Amino acid sequence: MTLIDEVKEFIDLDKSRAERIFHEDFSSDEFTAKCLTIECVEAYGGEGGGETYYSVYSFEKDAETVYLKFDGWYQSYHGSEFESYFEVTPVEKTITIYKSVKG
């Protein structure tokens, strides 16, 4: 079984686990018991971020890492709502910005 399959199986084993990860309302101990290390590597959304709301977590085991994005939405009068999760991969992006030459 691949690591991504193992992580997805573990998350799907408890129907509330994906939603709890999305809302950052989980204990890393439950992953440690499966020899998995979980870490939030990116989060976006909430007040001032429009409706876009998501978090990306890395799951590591035996020096192998997989990434899952937990996707949802946000509305100020409702809060955040989880929709789905899926595998993603980090991609480096180079950008050019223009800085003022005035002090």
Image (cartoon, grey):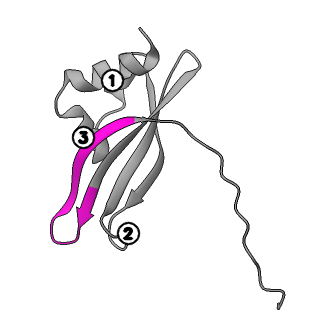
Category of crowding for the residue at label 2, using alpha-carbon neighbours closer than 10 angstroms: few (below 14), some (14–19), many (at least 20): few
Residue for badge 3: 20
User: Label 1, on which residue?
Assistant: 8
34 relative to 87, above or below:
above
Location of the C terminus (image quadrant): bottom right
| Residues at marks 3 and 1 touching, judged by CB atoms closer than 8 Å | no
Give residue 38's position: percent from left, percent from top. 44, 32
Q: Residue furthest top?
A: 1
Residue at point 23%, 33% (across, down): 17
Residue 31 seen from this side: yes
Q: Is residue 85 magenta?
A: yes
Apparent side of residue 33 relative to residue 93 in the rendered image (left or right): left
Which label number is shown at residue 49? 2
Residue 36 covered by magenta stretch? no
Query: 22 left or right of 65?
Result: left
Mark 3: secondary structure: helix
* Mark 3: few/some/many CA within 10 Å (<14, 14-19, 20+): few
Question: Where on the picture, by quarter, is residue 77?
Answer: bottom left
Which of the 4 quarters of the picture holds residue 94?
Answer: bottom right
- Residue under the point 44% across and 39% down: 57
- The x, y position of residue 36, in whole percent, is 43, 21
* Magenta residues (range): 73-86
Can residue 24 be spotted in the picture?
no
Nearer-N-terminus badge (1/2): 1
Left/right placement of residue 32 relative to residue 93 reads: left
Quadrant placement of the N terminus? top left
Type of amino acid at the residue the image marks with label 1: Lys
| Marks 3 and 2 close (CB-CB < 8 Å) | no
Q: Earlier in the sequence, mark 3 or mark 2?
A: 3
Nearer mark to the viewer, of 3 and 2? 2
* Amino acid type, callout 3: Arg
Residue sitting at 33 percent across and 23 percent down?
8
